[in-house]
Image (cartoon, helix red, strand yellow):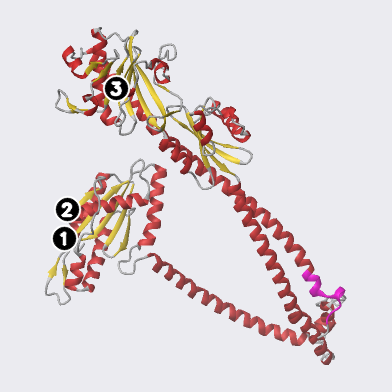
């Protein structure tokens, strides 16, 4: 083979132009890929952050809202009892209170250790401190003390399941505390002045003229070894006769969630409107050192200070209790924690988005360049073998048949580029001598092409039919001809998401044929298949056209009922149960007939339950209860069913 001159080589010219153009395209495509992936990730991330931060704010606000609700109940109940002339006598008062040698009044130790009160119930875990200068001789004051003790004892048992304690303080230097495990008042000295404590003086008329519930700042309680914040609510019997309700909310669990429950690659922190830092995973030592009195302005952390300034301006102009702020290098997702006026912040670095985008773009660039090199090598080999080599062969062969006559070529009816100096030009000069043979060859090739196209069309139709059949077999249960487990899961999950978005009711049925194993063992698997098919058809004919039926496996079926209330679901389920029970089946020789029944569990979507997995789980629990209760039943999930062992011969 003779290698062509470089300057006159069509192969090298094509390869060079292709390399330049494709390289430009690869670079542009890589850049566009990075931009598209990054913008897509930003959009989806912001949407996800909005849902996440809204949910976190609501979840973390729950305990504080509950505390405020408790106080309103306590205040209303206290005032009602006082106005109805709460029963009081000195004998009952000194039955629980006593004067100590230090001139203070305290509850007797039995009030903490436990004793049977006048109602026949056990009173315990309450201590009280009344300063030596309190007006204990005043009958109204003793009545106020006794009523406060009675209500603290009454409400404390239930409320301290969520809170550290329940207490009532009074401006007469009094504190009555329900605190299991802590003898608070018994450990107090006679010189204690509760009026100097933040949880008392923040309720005074000077500090709280609006007489509303107020929150203390964050502090560390050495008695409970816990970070706390307290809610205080004043009760005004008269303008001069007052008392205060108190709750201490333990925050260690909240801090644990803030530090450890976060999106991958992010971190959370909490701050107050005035710049006080409540929780930060990197500032634990500083918070412990300052006992929770840590201001962001005191820290030499320019980034945190920048975050606070950015968020502070947005908080002043906020329209909602949650929002997203885009900073230089990160997104700040912010939600208000109702009650103490805190703000929960999730810091989402933009590098979590740019890094995968850049990696994807680099990967595409490297792979594309590598593919280009391979393609150029292959192109060179192909052109040397398929173009340059045949051209030289055609020139040698054309010289032998050069004397033949072709009117279209010699008459310039079909002009050829024989003026070119490259291989195409040389081929054009020789093409005049072999055009007739090529013309005949071209006619044969056209006929062959049409034949091949027809064959390709036939084969394409066959492949399409095979594809349609395979897709159907992949989604339809071969025995019952209804959606299989995988297909049902995908379609049901989409229906649940659609119902959640539209705010529509949705119910989920779990159906299981009773004693199906007994049918297989007694009458044989063919009869069992007959039962499965008949039950599937019966269910399919009973439900509505918009409902979705699927076989989850074995004798277990499921139905999704969109836009359906619980009452409607019960009617449909009961109709299915009755029609299944009415079916009759026969043995192979038709010598014996038998019947079957079906058990059904129902679950319905609620305000916080729009998830396929929860609906499936609740319906399965209800089905389990139906099996346990005797089968051939329709049971609605109530939240009490707890599966223990598999039900035999389901």
Drawn side of residue 423 relative to residue 284, left or right: right
Regarding mark 2 in the picture, which secondary structure is present there? loop
Mark nearest the camera among 2 and 1 is 2
Where is mark 3, residue-wise? 74
State which tag comes first along the sequence, 2 or 1: 1
Q: Residue at x 83, y 81 (%)?
A: 3
Q: Within 10 Å of the Cα at label 3, are there few (<14), some (14-19), or many (20+) other Cα atoms?
A: some
Regarding mark 3 in the picture, which secondary structure is present there? helix
Q: Within 10 Å of the Cα at label 1, are there few (<14), some (14-19), or many (20+) other Cα atoms?
A: few
Where is mark 1, residue-wise? 582
Mark nearest the camera among 1 and 3 is 3
Residue 89 seen from this side: no
Residue 567 forms part of the magenta stretch: no
The x, y position of residue 412, in whole percent, is: 84, 78
Quadrant in which the N terminus is drawn: bottom right
Q: Main secondary structure of the magenta part?
A: helix
Whole-Å distance between the Cαs marked 2 and 1? 21 Å
The x, y position of residue 246, in whole percent, is: 35, 23
């Amino acid at each position: 083979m003779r290698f062509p001159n470089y300057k006159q080589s069509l192969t090298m010219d094509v390869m060079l132009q292709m390399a330049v153009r494709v390289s430009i395209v690869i670079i542009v495509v890589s850049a566009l890929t990075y931009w598209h992936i990054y913008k897509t990730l930003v959009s989806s991330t912001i949407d996800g952050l909005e849902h996440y931060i809204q949910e976190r704010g609501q979840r973390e606000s729950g305990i504080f809202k509950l505390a405020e609700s408790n106080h309103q109940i306590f205040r209303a109940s206290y005032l009602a009892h006082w106005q109805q002339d709460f029963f009081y006598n000195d004998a009952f008062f000194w039955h629980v209170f006593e004067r100590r040698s230090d001139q203070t009044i305290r509850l007797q130790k039995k009030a903490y250790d436990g004793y049977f009160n006048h109602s026949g119930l056990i009173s315990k875990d309450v201590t009280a401190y009344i300063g030596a200068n309190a007006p204990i001789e005043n009958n109204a004051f003793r009545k106020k003390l006794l009523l406060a003790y009675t209500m603290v004892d009454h409400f404390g048992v239930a409320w301290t399941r969520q809170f550290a304690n329940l207490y009532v303080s009074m401006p007469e230097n009094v504190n009555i505390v329900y605190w299991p495990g802590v003898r608070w008042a018994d450990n107090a000295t006679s010189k204690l002045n509760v009026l100097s404590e933040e949880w008392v003086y923040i309720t005074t008329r000077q500090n709280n003229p609006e007489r509303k519930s107020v929150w203390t700042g964050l502090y560390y309680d050495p008695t409970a070894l816990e970070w706390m914040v307290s809610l205080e609510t004043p009760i005004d019997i008269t303008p001069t006769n007052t008392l205060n309700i108190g709750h201490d909310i333990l925050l260690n669990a909240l801090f644990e969630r803030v530090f450890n429950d976060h999106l991958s690659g992010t971190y959370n922190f909490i701050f107050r409107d005035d710049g006080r830092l409540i929780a930060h995973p990197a500032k634990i030592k500083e918070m412990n050192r300052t006992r929770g009195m840590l201001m962001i302005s005191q820290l030499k952390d320019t980034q945190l200070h920048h975050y606070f300034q950015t968020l502070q301006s947005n908080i002043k102009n906020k329209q909602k209790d949650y929002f997203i702020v885009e900073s230089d290098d990160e997104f700040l997702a912010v939600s208000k924690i109702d009650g103490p006026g805190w703000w929960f912040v999730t810091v989402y670095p933009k590098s979590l988005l740019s890094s995968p985008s850049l990696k994807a773009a680099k990967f595409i660039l490297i792979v594309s360049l590598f593919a280009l090199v391979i393609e150029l090598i292959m192109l060179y080999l192909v052109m040397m073998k398929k173009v340059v080599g045949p051209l030289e062969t055609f020139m040698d062969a054309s010289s032998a048949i050069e004397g033949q006559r072709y009117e279209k070529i010699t008459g310039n009816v079909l002009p050829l580029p024989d003026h070119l100096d490259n291989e195409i030009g040389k081929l054009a000069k020789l093409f005049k001598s072999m055009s007739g043979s090529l013309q005949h060859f071209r006619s044969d090739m056209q006929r062959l092409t049409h034949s091949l196209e027809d064959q390709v069309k036939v084969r394409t139709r066959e492949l399409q039919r095979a594809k349609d059949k395979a897709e159907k077999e992949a989604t339809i249960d071969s025995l019952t001809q209804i959606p299989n487990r995988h297909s049902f899961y995908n379609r049901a999950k989409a229906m649940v998401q659609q119902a959640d978005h539209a705010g529509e009711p949705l119910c989920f049925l779990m159906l299981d044929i009773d004693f199906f194993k007994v049918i297989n063992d007694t009458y044989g698997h063919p009869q069992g298949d007959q039962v499965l098919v008949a039950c599937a058809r019966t269910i399919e004919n009973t439900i509505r056209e918009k409902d979705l039926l699927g076989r989850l496996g074995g004798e277990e079926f499921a139905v999704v009922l969109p836009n359906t209330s619980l009452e409607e679901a019960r009617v449909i389920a009961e109709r299915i149960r009755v029609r299944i029970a009415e079916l009759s089946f026969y043995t192979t020789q038709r010598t014996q007939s038998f019947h079957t029944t079906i058990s059904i569990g129902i679950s319905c979507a609620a305000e916080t339950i729009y998830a396929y997995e929860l609906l499936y789980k609740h319906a399965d629990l209800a089905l389990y209860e139906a099996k346990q209760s005797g089968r051939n039943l329709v049971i609605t999930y109530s939240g009490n069913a707890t599966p223990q062992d598999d039900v035999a011969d389901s």
